[in-house]
Image (tube, rainbow, N blue to C red):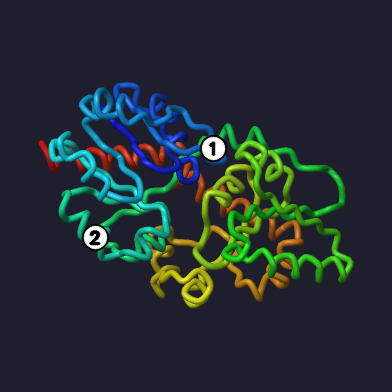
Amino acid sequence: MRILNLSLGQDTGGQQGRLQDAWPKHFPEDEYLSLTSTKTFYPIKHRLNLSELMREHWPWSEVLHLNNDLRYLDRFRRLQPSDKALVIHHHGTMFRTRLDYHLEALERFRATAIMSTVDLWALAPEQTTWQPQTYELEELQSYRDPIDDDIIRIAHAPTNRGIKGTAALEQAVRRLQKDGAPVELTIIERQSNQKCLRLKGQADIYVDQMILGYGCNAIEAWGMGIPVIAGVDPELARSKVLQTIPLDTRDRMLQLWGDIPFMESTEDGLYVSLSKMLQPGTRKHYAAKGMRHFMRFHESSTSTDRLRQVYALALSKVT
């Protein structure tokens, strides 16, 4: 296959770059190119140039892996997207807030849809597939560098403090410290992905967010052997981020996974959850659960094999 992973915006969560690196290791018979246009916290492997895209990359590709919005295919009508296998990869807000719009585009372009998170898949489980993000275990473990002292370090990396429940976490940690617990909170913000990974690698506990389940930060923590606290709260999502996630999102997680890989918590319950996680046996238990989940779904060879099956399905629609 000749696969072009294209985003006219940013590389959400660094997923395009990781696939660019992982694909040749597992499928050397394929050719894989990721193009994106805006730099975020993740290094860009190949920067998008529209003239090169139209002149070289688009004609070369067999599979188009697009991100977030199929409608920008209308900008390239003369390039005949109908002769390509189309895969659309949704990552969050755009799909949640304009569901009908994106489902109509999915049908119009005869595309195959994959979703980065389970709450997105749960919005349209008959039309879409959950696609776990790809990570290299060896790379993540190279960042693991726990500090050998009596302090229990809690890491948290909010892109949006309101959504991630940062204030509730800070309050819970202050309460633990007032109780005399030897805990320290590291909040990682406005850092490169590598710096974030280095700081995360020193932690004993990682706290993700208590609204939408887990994200890339939790996956990275699991790959380092760090237990994760997270949660799913559809009601809070509606009031706090003004987005709707299905009420059965947690049930969908159990349907896919058979178990919940993180310690479940609400924002109000963080003090109790962290108190439990201070016990070494509890941390070991949830670290093992997280690693099993990581190896089953997010480890590079597993997740890319799953994605290649999606590409093959998309190809079958045009051949």
Residue 98 vertical position relative to residue 79 in the rendered view, above or below: below
Visible in this render: residue 1?
no
- Where in the figure is residue 234, as x and y percent of width and height? 47, 73
Residue 122 occupies which quadrant of the picture?
bottom left
291 or 221, which is in the foreground?
221
SS state under label 2: helix
Instruction: State the CA–CA distance, disc 2 to disc 1.
Output: 29 Å
Residue 227 versus residue 61 in the image, above or below: below
| Residue type indicated by callout 1 | Tyr
Quadrant containing the N terminus is top left
Secondary structure beneath dot 1 equals loop
Picture quadrant of residue 4? top left
Sequence-first disc among 2 and 1:
1
**Does residue 136 appear to the left or right of 282 in the view shown?**
left
Dot 2 and dot 1 residues touching (CB under 8 Å): no
Other residues around mark 2 within 10 Å, as few (<14) / some (14–19) / many (≥20): some
For the C terminus, which image quadrant? Answer: top left
**Mark 2 lies on residue:** 103
Q: Tell me the tag on residue 42.
A: 1
Quick one: label 1, few (<14), some, or many (20+) residues within 10 Å? many
Quick one: 294 or 179, which is closer to the camera? 179
Residue farthest along the left direction in this orientation:
319
Inspect the image, locate mark 2, and give the three-letter code of the amino acid beneath it. Leu
